[in-house]
Image (cartoon, rainbow, N blue to C red):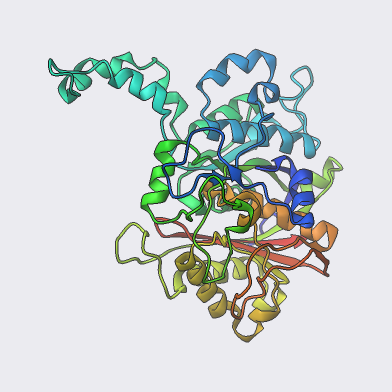
Amino acid sequence: MSRRRVVITGLGPVSAHGLGIEPLWSALCEGRSALAPLRSFDARGFAAASGGELPENYDVKDLVPKSYRKATKVMARDIEIAVGGALHAVTDAGLRTRGNDPDNPPTIPADRFGCHIGAGLIAADLDELTAALATSKDAAGKFDPGHWGQQGMQELTPLWLLKYLPNMLACHVTIIHDCQGPSNTITCNEASSGLSLAESQRVIERGAADACLSGGADSKLNPMAYLRQELAGRLAQCAADEDATRKVKPFDPTSPGALVGEGGGILVLEAEETAKSRGARIHAVLAGTGASQSWCDDTVGLVPDATGESLADAIEAALRDAGIAPDAIDAIIPYGCGVPALDALEAKALERVFGAGLPAKPIVTLAPSIGATVAGFGTIAVAVAVKCLSEQRLPARLNSASTGNLCAAAAPSEARALRQILVCTPSLGGQNSAVVISRA
């Protein structure tokens, strides 16, 4: 059955290095890390007091139409990341939408423009929540859950829940840019962005839309979400006075763990014929995607599948979808967060797929520069893959020394002939995602 080819025409990554691919790419090639002591809350009571925060000048009010600024009051950080990434991607793709040019007809008709955004489980702001909780006390001054259920929760602002629902990322983006085509939200932890790109791919291939805003965003840099990362055993020991830039060592068994980064963003995926008919610049081709579910002992994926079999299944599915053999892959961008058990899972999966050819496949590692970006990872990784292909260059790798049969040890940026790049990740919960990006 024939299917429409899907291309990438707009890049809107958001990371600790800033908005857009250029500041991220420059930092990666220069070997600069944005990991530093956290500003958003006092994290000194946690294992890690450092992570990858967006620059202080990132302000969502500057990234929405003036008529929409009131809505920013009900945007959690995750929503702000998606909204900023969408504007940047739309602009990069040369599209007119209601969000960036309301006075002219849109480039893509609204009913042919879809949206699929991966999200994490957004944690409530502690100040907002505790201000309401504090009203529910008994005579002894202790918290009274009965009072909270009957009356206390009514002290929350009426729009409180709209700030923290995961589907609100896609809601705001579709309203701003008037995307009336197929829309969905995927909440599968680290695999969320990759699975969202896969959904957009299928929607465009089958003709249900001509273009989609697609990607994911996540911020774990608040006390409640951060605690979950610590309880999951993900955080490295990193005091506020330690050099965070040297902590994360992907695929090195001596790595102490991960440091969390906020980020993600949006890409514009488009049918190739639509992009060509409007004279768009095509950055790269979304050649194939794959997904799978891991079996795990604890049912939630906290203990990863040590065999790597399930992630390998997703990678092999993406290769089949792209119509290529493993030896056609020229570089790999895995999650590589620095948690030894997760890195070992990914290494096993890559060994299953690439066998004796694996040591010749250069690995691109992002976590030492921007942190583990969870649901936002896939978008950032695909944007970096696109830039690698267009520049015919690999960025620098940081920190890792002993990485076994993986080509993942610290190294400077280098020129390299690249045609196809694999992006893949497992996730807390067991979902796996793989994406093949091909040179335009």
Q: Toward the viewer: 159 or 116?
A: 159
Residue 331 on image: x %, y %: 70, 69
Whether residue 118 can be seen here: yes
Left or right of residue 286, residue 186 in this image: left
Q: Toward the viewer: 93 or 124?
A: 124
The residue that appears at 46% across and 53% down in the rendered structure is 235
The image quadrant that residue 216 belongs to is: top right
The residue that appears at 37% across and 60% down in the rendered structure is 301
**Extreme bottom residue here?**
356
Residue 219 on image: x %, y %: 52, 40
Vertical arrangement, residue 259 with respect to residue 410, above or below: above
Whether residue 215 can be seen here: no
Residue 151 on image: x %, y %: 23, 15
**Extreme right residue here?**
279
Quadrant in the picture for the C terminus:
bottom right
**Extreme front residue here?**
241
The residue that appears at 54% across and 62% down in the rendered structure is 338
The image quadrant that residue 397 belongs to is: bottom right
